Amino acid sequence: MKKIVIAIDGTSSSGKSSFARRIAAKLGYIFIDTGAMYRAVTLYAMRRGCIAVDGTIDTECLIAGLPEVTIEFRPNPVSGNSDIYLNGENVEQPIRTIEVSDRVSAVSQIPAVREQLVELQRLIGTEKGVVMDGRDIGTVVFPDAELKLFMTADPEVRAMRRYRELTERGEKVSLEEIIENIRKRDQADMTRAVSPLKKAPDALTLDNSRMSQEEQMVWVMEKINKLTQGNS
Ligand code: DC
């Protein structure tokens, strides 16, 4: 069976990462959550003191620290997923806090950050057999990907999903706070100058507001089978 690159872009909390993870598991492909990479750089910048309490970023401070940032994905034998490591530390949990979510859009707008991460993403994807999710995968990172998806869902549905995810982990957040964060991130991601979130012309749209995980999988497997069958 021919191996392909699957690029999944879309709005915040549209279920891209969990869908990408499930597709990768089903096909035996590598899964790369590029949002986690931008989050890891944001966490690094916060710890280095490059981001003020009001969210203002000292860009020079962040750029000076970039050569020290090492990001890797390593398999987690317990969960069966792969976890993200920042300079050797497993940061899978701390990158998902609301503090990081509030600051990541601003950090991801810095061209030097994008250059470093896009280079790493392309390196990881040189071997086919990869499912990568983010905002610019089908437009910038892998414009030649064989299958491009653009995922979205109604903002209320997305906020509710994020709310459940965070409260299950014991975070104290309100639904209003999350709706506000999603609204701001959609706006920032779509209007930024560098690699804004936009649908590639040849991407297929998947609005999963009212679709179950199974329905989404049936939908995508039909597309994947058409692309991979009959080719070795
Ligand atoms: O997918 P996520 O919500 O974890 O992504 C976090 C942030 O990172 C999001 O606000 C936009 C940014 N991002 C990006 O600019 N480019 C990507 N390829 C992935 C994420």
Image (tube, rainbow, N blue to C red):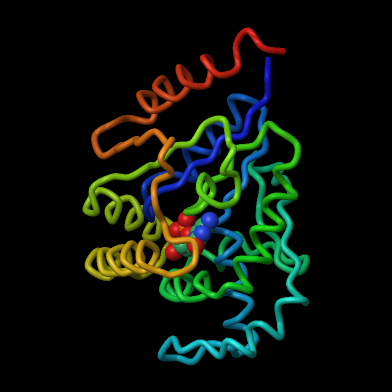
Residue 187: x %, y % from top left: 31, 66
Q: Is residue 45 above or below residue 183?
A: below
Residue 100 point in image, percent of width and height: 48, 72
Q: Is residue 135 left or right of residue 30?
A: left
Seen in the picture, residue 18 relative to 215 is either above or below; the reply is: below
Residue 156 in the figure: left or right of residue 45: left
Q: Quadrant of the N terminus?
A: top right
Q: Quadrant of residue 85?
A: bottom right
Q: Residue at x 51, y 14 (%)?
A: 226
- Residue at 51% across, 44% down: 138
**Relative depth, front residue between 93 and 7:** 7
- Between 183 and 86, the one nearer to me in the picture: 183
- Marker count (numbered): 0
Q: Measuring 64% from the left and 89% from the top, which residue is drawn there?
A: 61
Q: Assign the C terminus to one quadrant of the image.
A: top right
Give me the residue at 62% from left, 24% from top: 27
Query: Which is nearer the eye, 198 or 125?
Result: 198
- Residue 81's spot in the image, x, y percent? 63, 42
> In the current view of this chain or complex, which residue is farthest to the top?
230
Q: Residue 214, percent across and down?
A: 39, 24
